[in-house]
Image: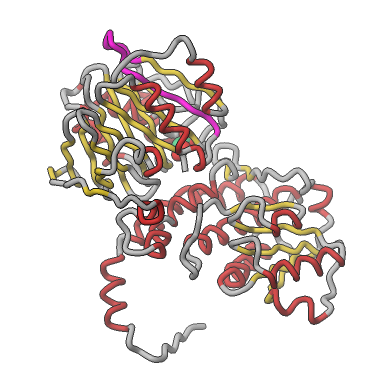
Amino acid sequence: MCGIIGYVGEQEAAPVIIDGLRRLEYRGYDSVGIAVLNDRGDLEVRKKEGKIAGLATQLEDQWPHGKQGIGHTRWATHGRPSDVNAHPHTDCSGDIVVIHNGIVENHRELRRKLVDGGHGFISETDTEVIPHLIEEKVKAGKSLHDALMSTIKELQGAHAILVMSKSEPGTIVAGRVGNAGGVVIGYGDGETFIASDLPALLPHTRSLVFLEHGDTARVTATGVDYCHEGLPITRMPEDVPLDALSAAKGSYKHFMQKEIAEQPEGLLDTIRGRALFGESRVELDEENLTPERLRKIERVLLVGMGTSLHSAMVGRYYMEQIAGIPAEIDNASELRYRNPLIGPETLVVSVTQSGETVDTLAAMEEAGRKGCLQIAITNVPGSQASRVADGTVYTRCGLEVGVASTKTYTASITALYLLALYLAQERGKIDRERMAGFLEPLARLPNLTGEMLKHEPEIEKLAHKLHRCKNFLVLGR
Ligand code: GLU
C-alpha cells in the first residue's frame, strides 16, 4: 500500500504533504517523493530512497515554496527502490508530474511504443509510461483531465493516479481504476486535499468523497469536477463520523464487506518487493532460510486451523507442483496428538492470520521439539508464530476485523505461492523461463480480483435468493 497525497489551497503545500505522508507511514514504503508547483510557476521535484525523515531533512532550509503539490511513498513493484525510481515521474519536458499506486500490466508494450515515438525514459518503473502518455495527449490539445481520462483507457491493471502540470496551475487531476488503493478527496475552506487513506485527511477535514472505480476528478482549491468512465457525474461530499473505528469503515456497511473489497490491495502488497518481475526472481527477506538449509528439505507439512487450513490445502499443490517437494497438510489441533514422524528434513509451514492461534502455536512447539525447519505465514508482524518460526512470509493486509477470514485468506494463498517459487529457486529446481511463466499471472492477480469484485450486485441478488436454504450440496470431481 503506497501512500498518495495531494494539496491545493492557500497554505505552503510541502509541509502539508510531508505531514500527510507521515500519517500514511504505517502502510509501508521504500522511498518518498514530492512535487510542488512553486510560486514562479516551476515544478520542483524532490525524491529519495528510504524514510520520510530522510527526505524531510534534505528539504530543511530549502523547502520548495508553492501552494499546490503532490507526494508519494512508493512500495516498489517494478524497478528496485532507488532515488531515480521513486515517484513523482515526469514527461520529457518535465512539465507534467505523476504519482501512481498499482501496476501498469502492459507497461512493456507502452514503453516500446513511446520510445519508438521519441520519448526518453530514466527510471525502471512501469509508472513512467503514464506522464509520457499524458504528454502526448496534452500536446494534441487535450486538457490535463481529458488527457488522464484517455490515458487511463490505455493502461491495463488497477491504479490510483495523481497528475499536476505547469500548464494548468491550480489544478490536480486524480483517477482511480480498479482496486489498487483508494483515493479520497477532502474538502476544506478554500483548500482541497487528496489522499489514499483517511488518516492523512482527518486532521484537516471530515467532508469527504471516496472515488469509485472508474472515477476521475479535476481538483482545485475551491471545488472538484468528477467524471465516471469519461462522463460528468455529481459526487456530494459526506461527513465521516468522529469515532476512529467508524471512520476506518469508510463507506462500507460493515468491516467484512470492506475487507472483501480490500483483497486486490492486500494481494498487491503481499507481492510487492518479493516477485521481481523484471529479473524473474522471488526475494524473501529471511536470512535464516539459506539455500543450504532449504536444500535439505525432503518434505513439507502445512498446518493451520479453519480458513488457514484451507489455504494450506491449496499451498500443498504449490509445494508439490512448483517446488517439487512431497507435501501434506494437517489440522494444527491434531498434530501433537499423533506423535508425527517429522524431523530436521521436514519443513513445517504454519498458516495463522493472527499469529496467535493456540492450536497452531502448539503444533509449532511440537515441530520445534522435533527439530523441523519452520516458516510461518501470518498477517501480524511480531506475533508469536513469527517469533517461533525460522522465517516468516507476512501477508500484508492490514488489520482484519471480521471473524471470517477474507483478505487474509487470499493473501495467504499468494504467500504460499511465492514460498513455493522461492523454494524451487533456492533449491535450483526452476529455470528463468518457467519462473517467468509462474510470475506473470501474479502481476495481473490484483486487478483480476478487482474485476471479480465488480460482480457484487449479482452476488448480492443471489444471496437474497439463497440465504434461507438449510443445506447446500456441492458436487464436483
Ligand atoms: N508500480 C509502481 C512502481 O513500482 C507503483 C508502486 C506503488 O504502488 O508504490 O513504482
Q: Most extreme residue toward the front, as rendered? A: 242
Range shown magenta:
30-43
Residue ID at (28%, 28%): 134
Q: Is residue 159 above or below residue 46?
A: below
Q: Position of residue 148 (x, y in %)?
A: 25, 33
Q: Is residue 42 magenta?
A: yes
In this rendering, the answer to whether 344 lies above or below 216 is: below
Horizontal relation, residue 41 to residue 346: left or right: left
Find residue 88 and report its image quarter: top left
Q: Please state if 68 lies on the left or on the right of 18 as rendered.
A: left
- Judging depth in this view, the residue of 106 and 445 nearest the camera is 445
Judging from the image, the colouring scheme is secondary structure
For residue 377, which quarter of the picture?
bottom right
Picture layout, residue 417 above or below residue 174: below
Where's residue 11, x and y in %? 30, 21
What residue is drawn where x is 68% and y is 53%? 392
Q: Position of residue 36 (x, y in %)?
A: 35, 19
Question: Which residue corresponds to the image point at 47% horizontal and 31% vertical from the top-left?
Answer: 125
Q: Judge whether residue 93 can be spotted in this image.
A: no
Residue 341 in sight from this viewpoint: yes
Horizontally, is 358 left or right of 113 in the view? right
Q: Position of residue 420 (x, y in %)?
A: 66, 57
